[in-house]
Amino acid sequence: MRTQINLSRQPFTNRRVLWIAIVAVYLTSFWLFLWIATEKDRVLAKESKVQLQIDGQRQAAIDAKLEQERRNKSVQKIVVTEQQALQLAAARQLIQRKGFSWNRMIGEIELYVPKKTRIMSIKVEEVSNDADQVLATVQVKALGTTPAEMTEMMMSLEKSGGLFTVGETNQDATLESGETPFTLVLTYKPSRGDSQ
């Protein structure tokens, strides 16, 4: 016969609760271990991503700085002497003057000259050449048989549809031959197609 000796007044006989508590502590610890490992991996991945972005931006800044230095080295200041500047200005004036046809301009002026008036000289004072049009200031000296021919020519030019605009005018005293010299300053504005 087996004898059980119980030294306590109320001995603990339910060991199931003890084992459940031990298993619960173990499972909680295991879950916390897994959660900490997962969080650590997530934080390390985020840190790696941020570090890659920082490295990329740092490299972009270095590339931009190198590009700026390369551009500064490649752009050299062009030194133009006074003689070269004069030659450049003269070349630009030639190009501007070539922007319209003298023959066409003279032909168009002749259309508005009264029949009894003679043209003495035509002088182009200034030519400006824009992308859209050519604009020239032209001085016309003429000799009319009567003083009224200057007014007639001015009125005729005003009807040119914007091709000619009359600016300054000057009429001199009648000569011994009875002819009246006059000077007209015109603004000549042919369209781009007409100027070639």
Image (cartoon, grey):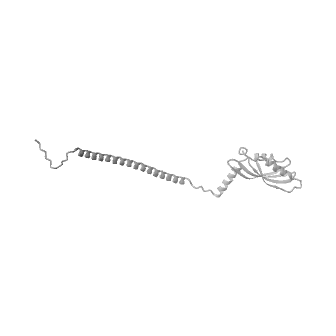
Task: Identify which residue, 46 or 97, lies in the foreground.
Answer: 46
Single out the residue that lies furthest toward the front. Answer: 9
Residue at figure coordinates x 77%, y 50% from the top left: 165
Task: Identify which residue, 95 or 131, lies in the foreground.
Answer: 131
Residue 14: % across, % down: 21, 45
Residue 64: % across, % down: 50, 52
Residue 179: % across, % down: 87, 53
Q: Is residue 98 visible?
A: no
Single out the residue that lies furthest toward the bottom. Answer: 82
- Exactly how many numbered labels are in the figure? 0
Q: Is residue 56 left or right of residue 81?
A: left
Q: Quadrant of the C terminus?
A: top right
Q: Is residue 187 visible?
A: yes
Residue 1: % across, % down: 10, 41
Residue at figure coordinates x 79%, y 49% from the top left: 158
Residue at figure coordinates x 34%, y 47% from the top left: 35
Q: Is residue 120 left or right of residue 21?
A: right
Q: Is residue 120 left or right of residue 195?
A: right
Single out the residue that lies furthest toward the left. Answer: 1
Task: Identify which residue, 115 or 28, lies in the foreground.
Answer: 28
